[in-house]
């Protein structure tokens, strides 16, 4: 659990500043579960430049509670939490100083979103909160007020959790968070999980990830792990201490994250050398009569496929459908072996490419349309799918035919600029598994939005 906070102060000499406003959002890594926002009477003068910056003046604070009146609430809402702030060293120091004045030693673990951003989102022009969130398309209101800045920090931290592909933030939280140091009671773990689409991570007590999976219903899937009697499930049941998860909204994002993070983290209960998730592919070649032929064949690492399939039957179903939809020849797609005309020609559903009656130019145009539709080679495009909330969408970026990575954006944000898009994207590996996942998902989900980008 995290306590994302922002503090506005009076300014002044080091360790003599007072708090004028505080906002704390208790954040479980997915959503805000509690909050505390209050003006605070600092019982001292506010520096003029601070008044100009925040708009908070002494008149506004005359009837506000003093720090000792809100101290208990601050202790309660941050209990068992890791403090998260933009420039956490400053906010944590100010809080600690105020508590020392009350004779109370305030200690919490802390994370700084400035340091995390420099590591996970390098090469930004500025890491000040306002400029950074603006460049990442994160909406911010009431800049330089505690609530607005803390809300922006929550959204930034959520993006940083997405970009932390090695899961160091989550692993540290599992290890440090005292509320998670419990015996692994399976019913309690399941009770805390949502029935949503995402990727889940099964941890041992030291935070190590021992299994990664994807599901359209995480709660149901973990329940299956805990009730199964196969040898692997029994080992997981014995070792599980905590289950964390990432909501993705989109099944495509979940599939891509699962594939990438199994390869990256190599959990002991995911097969170390996971077999390729596809076995067959669609290839094309020109015959001696200049017709483009399509062929489903076993994957050959020396050839570049148009698209790939989990098995031969899946490939055959695909080719059968495109023959019907695009009025292709059964012979030139490998569905009907003959030295003469194909069966569809006899029933007038083929225009005779099999016997040279249909000109190659017209036939090839239809074949090329199929190839273009099922391959993103040389394209700059973004696939837009469901997000984790109603006002959010996911973006899967393809640049010059290469899968670059994925991210999430607010619906109010324009995403047709390639340079800005790249700043919100978490980079991911462009391998054959990722290509297969994307292409097969697009085949199954024809209504998914695809935007062609200007280079």
Image (tube, rainbow, N blue to C red):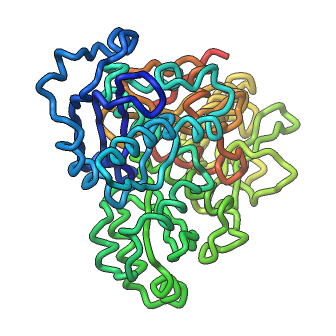
> Is the residue 168 above or below the residue 252 in the image?
below
Give the image location of residue 283, x and y in percent.
75, 46
The residue drawn where x is 72% and y is 28% is: 400
Q: Is residue 200 visible?
A: yes
Looking at the picture, tell me which residue is in the foreground, 338 or 438: 438
Q: Position of residue 289 (x, y in %)?
A: 84, 33
Please determine whether, in this image, residue 394 is positioned above or below residue 210. above
Quarter of the figure with residue 422 = top right
Residue 217 image-quadrant placement: bottom left
**In the picture, which quadrant includes the C terminus?**
top right
Task: Quadrant for the N terminus, please.
Answer: bottom left
Name the residue nearer the viewer: 423 or 213.
423
Residue drawn at (56%, 58%), measured in percent from left and top?
A: 258
State the image coordinates of residue 86 (x, y, percent, origin top left). Answer: 48, 34
Q: Residue furthest left?
A: 63
Q: Nearer the viewer, residue 195 or 279?
A: 195
Q: Residue at x 47, y 55 (%)?
A: 109
Relative to 243, say whether 417 is above or below. above
Of residue 8 and residue 273, the one placed in the foreground of this image is 8
Q: Quadrant of residue 229?
A: bottom left
């Amino acid at each position: 659990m995290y306590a994302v906070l922002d503090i506005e102060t009076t300014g002044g000499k080091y360790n003599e500043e007072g708090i004028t406003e505080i906002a704390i959002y208790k954040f479980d890594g997915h959503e805000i579960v509690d909050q505390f926002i209050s003006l605070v009477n600092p019982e001292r003068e506010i520096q003029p430049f601070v008044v100009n910056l925040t708009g908070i003046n002494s008149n506004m604070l005359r009837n506000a509670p003093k720090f000792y009146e809100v101290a208990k609430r601050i202790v309660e809402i941050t209990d068992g939490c890791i403090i998260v702030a933009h420039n956490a060293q400053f906010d944590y120091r100010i809080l600690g100083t105020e508590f020392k004045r009350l004779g109370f030693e305030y200690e919490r673990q802390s994370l700084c979103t400035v340091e995390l951003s420099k590591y996970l989102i390098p090469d930004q022009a500025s890491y000040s909160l306002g400029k950074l969130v603006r460049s990442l398309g994160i909406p911010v209101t009431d800049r330089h007020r505690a609530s607005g800045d803390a809300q922006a920090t929550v959204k930034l931290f959520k993006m940083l959790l997405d970009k932390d592909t090695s899961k160091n933030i989550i692993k540290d939280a599992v290890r440090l968070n005292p509320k998670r140091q419990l015996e692994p009671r399976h019913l309690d773990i399941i009770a805390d999980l949502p029935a949503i689409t995402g990727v889940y991570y099964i941890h041992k007590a030291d935070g190590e990830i021992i299994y990664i999976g994807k599901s359209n219903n995480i709660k149901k899937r973990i329940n299956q792990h805990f009730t199964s009697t196969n040898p692997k499930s029994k080992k997981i049941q014995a070792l599980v201490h905590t289950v964390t998860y990432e909501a993705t909204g989109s099944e495509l994002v979940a599939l891509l994250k699962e594939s990438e993070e199994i390869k990256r983290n190599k959990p002991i209960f995911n097969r170390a050398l996971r077999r390729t998730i596809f076995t067959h592919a669609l290839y094309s070649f020109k015959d001696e009569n200049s017709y483009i032929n399509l062929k489903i064949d076993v994957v050959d690492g020396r050839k570049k496929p148009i698209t790939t399939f989990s098995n031969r039957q899946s490939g055959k179903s695909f080719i059968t459908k495109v023959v019907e939809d695009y009025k292709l020849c059964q012979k030139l797609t490998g569905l009907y072996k003959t030295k003469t005309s194909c069966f569809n020609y006899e029933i007038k559903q083929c225009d005779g490419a099999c016997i040279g009656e249909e000109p190659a130019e017209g036939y090839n145009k239809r074949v090329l349309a199929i190839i273009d539709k099922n391959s993103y080679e040389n394209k700059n495009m973004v696939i837009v799918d469901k997000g984790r909330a109603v006002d959010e969408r996911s973006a899967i970026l393809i640049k010059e035919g290469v899968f670059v990575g994925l991210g999430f954006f607010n619906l109010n944000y324009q995403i047709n600029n390639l340079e800005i898009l790249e700043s919100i994207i978490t980079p991911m590996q462009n391998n054959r598994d990722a290509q297969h996942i994307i292409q097969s998902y697009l085949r199954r989900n024809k209504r998914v939005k695809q935007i062609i980008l200007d280079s």
